[in-house]
Image (cartoon, helix red, strand yellow):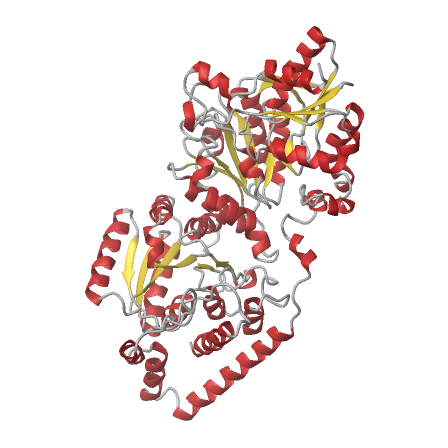
Amino acid sequence: MQLLRRFDERAGELYGAGQIGGFLHLAIGEEAAIVGATRALEDRDWLLTTFRAHAHALARGSEPARVMAELFGRVGGLCHGRAGAMHLTDVERRFLGGFGMVGGHLPIAAGAALASTYQGRAEVTMAILGDGASGNGVFGESLGLAAKWNLPVVLVIVRALGGYATEGDAAAASADLQRQVEGLGVKALTCNGMDVVDTQAVCADAVRIARTERRPVLVQAPTLRAPTPSPTAPRAAGDREQIAAWKARDPLALFGDRLVEVGLVESADRARLQMQVGAVIEQAVSFAGRSPHPEPEALYEHVLAPGGSGEAWRGFDLRGTSRRAEAGPHPREASK
Amino acid sequence: MSRTLTYREALNDALREELDRDQRVLLLGEDIGAFDGAFRVTKGLLADYGEERVRDTPSAPGTIVGMGVGAAIVGLRPVVELMTITAALRALDQIAVSAAQARFQSGGQLSVPLVLRAPQGGGHQLGPTHSHSLEAMLLAIPGLLVATPSTPADAKGLLKSAIRSDDPVFVIEHESLYGTKGEIPEGEHLVPFGEAVVRRPGRDLTILGISRGALTALDAADVLEREHGVSAEVVDPRTLRPLDLPTILESVKRTNRLLIVEEGWPQGGVGATIAALVLEQAFDFLDGPVLRVAGAEAPVGYSRVLERAAQASSREVAQAALTALGR
C-alpha cells in the first residue's frame, strides 16, 4: 500500500512536469481495495483491471522500475512504451492488463476462466472494475454466461465514492446491483474497500467460492478516492473540507496506525519502511529516465505474430511510394 | 483425388478436421449447436464433439468475441461464429481493440489465436441488416488478418489455416455461396494466407474480384470472351491481409489494365485501397485508369429488385471492362 501511494504521488508530480503523458489515473484512496483484492489471488490466478492499471501491476508484484519506464513511454517499460499507464500488462505475473475501454475486459476475463476450466486447471480469473462498468451491456452478459458455464470469475467493483455521492445513495446502488447479479446466479459479497484486511478476507472468500464451487462471484468494495487532480482536470483538487474528510479516512494511514496499535509494527519501523519505499521509487524514476525512447521503426513490431502468415505483410508500408523500396519479399518467398 | 462438396460442407469439414487435430480448438456462437448453425455450417458438430467444445451462446456478440479473446490469450484456439457480419459491428470494440491490438499493446507478451467467422453479402432478401459486405471496415484494422474465400476449396483451406494462425483472423464467408459446389483435394488441404490465385488467365485486362466478386468477374469474363472477343484475366486475392500485391502487380504489368469488383460500399472500399496501391507501384504500366465496380452507395433493400440493384452484376462488370478497354 505504501508502495502504491508513494508511486502515485511521485507519478502525479512527474505527470505535472510533463514526464508522463496521456491520462494518468491515480489510485490514491483505493490502495486497500487494490492490495486486498489482489492479495486474495494465488500466483496461478489471472488478473485484469481498469485503466488504473499501474497501481494494479505494482500490487501484483511487477517491478516498479519497469512500471515507471512504461509510464515514461520507454523501451525499458513492461510493454516497451506501447501501453502507457492505462494498458500495462505483465504476463509473467499473470496480469493480463489494464483496459482502456470501460468494461471491455469483462468478457475477456470470462474467456480466460473458460480456457482455465476447459484445460482442467483450477485457476481463478479476477477482474477489477469501476462502478461505471456495471452499466455496460457486457457486464450482465459476461456474468450471465459465466454463471451458465460454471466459470470461476471474481469481479471486484471498486466503487469510488470520491466524496461526491452520499453514503445512502451508494448503499442503495449497491443493493440494486446485488439483486441484479443474484438474479443471474452470481454470488454477491460486499467488503469495506477502505480496509485492506477486510477486503482481503472477503475477496479470499470470493476466490475460494469461485475455485471450489465453479461459479462467478461479485465483490463490491466501496472506497473513498482522494480528492486529487483528475487526468482531465489536472489542477482541480477538492476543497479543504473534502481533503480533511478524506484524510480522516485514509486507508493507508489508518492501517499503519492499527499495525502500531496492535504492536505488529514499531513507529520507527514505519518511518524506515517509508524511506525504503521512497528509495525504490527514486530508483524506478532514475531507471525510467535513463531508458531510451523506442525507435520509430519499432512501431511495426508485434503488430502481427512473428513467423506467422501475416508476417510478409509487415514488409509493405501502405503510406505510399516513398517507402516503396522497403516492400518485402513476395509472401510466397517469405513463407518458405 | 478430390471430392465434390458445397461451400458449407467444406467449412464443416475444416472445423471437424481441426477439432480432431487440436484439442485447444472449440467453437462458440449463437445457435451453432442444437440448431446446426443459422446457415448449417456447424451441422452435427454438437453431437460429435459435445457441448464442452461446441458451445451455444446467447445473442451477445461483444461478449462472445471478448470471451474468445480471453480464451485465446489463455491458451485455446476458439472459433467464434457470428450469425451475420452485421453482428461484428456489435463486437467491433473487442475485434479492433482487444483482439487486434493485444499483441502490440503488450509489447509482444500476448497472442490472440482467435478465428471469427461470419457470412456477408445479399442474395436471400434479408434486407438492410443482414446483407451488407463489410470487408473494408475489417481490413482497416491493423493486426487483424482477413480472408474472403470464394470457392469451397478455399473456404476449407483458408479456415484451416486461420485456426492454426497465431494472429486473430476474420474469415468472411458469403451468404449466397454456402450452397455452391466445388472440388476439394483429398487429405490435408491448407490454403496459405497471402497467396492470390489467377482463376482465369487472360491478356487484355485484369479483373480483380473480392469475395463473391471473384465469381462475378468470372461470369463477366465469359461474356467478354463470347460476345466481345476480349481476353480477361481474373485474379482472386483470397486474403486481404496479407494481400498478395506482387501477384496483382505482375498481372497488371502484363495486361496493363485493372478493374476491381467488390460488393462492399465504394467509399473507402477495398477496391479504393488496391487501386491506390497499384497506382503508386505500377503507374507506368497502366494504359488507362483503374476502374471499380462496387456495391451501390446505399443500404441493401429487401425487394428482390432493390437487392439486385445494390450488388455488382456480371453485366455491369463486363460493361466496365469494355470501358476500361476504350470500347
Q: Which quadrant does the N terminus of chain B fall into?
A: top right
Q: In which quarter of the image is residue A293?
A: bottom right
- The residue that appears at 29% across and 66% down in the rendered structure is A161
Horizontal arrangement in the rendering, residue B245 relative to residue A242 (left or right) = right
Does A75 appear above or below B112? Answer: below
Residue A49 in picture, x, y percent from top left: 44, 60
Does B124 appear above or below A284? Answer: above
Horizontal arrangement in the rendering, residue A80 relative to residue B284 (left or right) = left
On the question of residue B4 being in view, the answer is: no
Residue A283 in picture, x, y percent from top left: 58, 80
Depth check: A188 or B232 in front? B232
Q: Which quadrant does the C terminus of chain B fall into?
A: top right
- The residue that appears at 39% across and 54% down in the rendered structure is A153
Horizontal arrangement in the rendering, residue A10 relative to residue B284 (left or right) = left
Residue B151 in picture, x, y percent from top left: 62, 22
Q: In which quarter of the image is residue B292?
A: top right
On the question of residue A212 being in view, the answer is: yes
Q: Residue furthest top?
A: B227
Does A219 appear above or below B44? Answer: below
Q: How many marks?
A: 0
Does A180 appear above or below A219? Answer: above
Residue B272 in picture, x, y percent from top left: 62, 33
Q: In which quarter of the image is residue B266?
A: top right
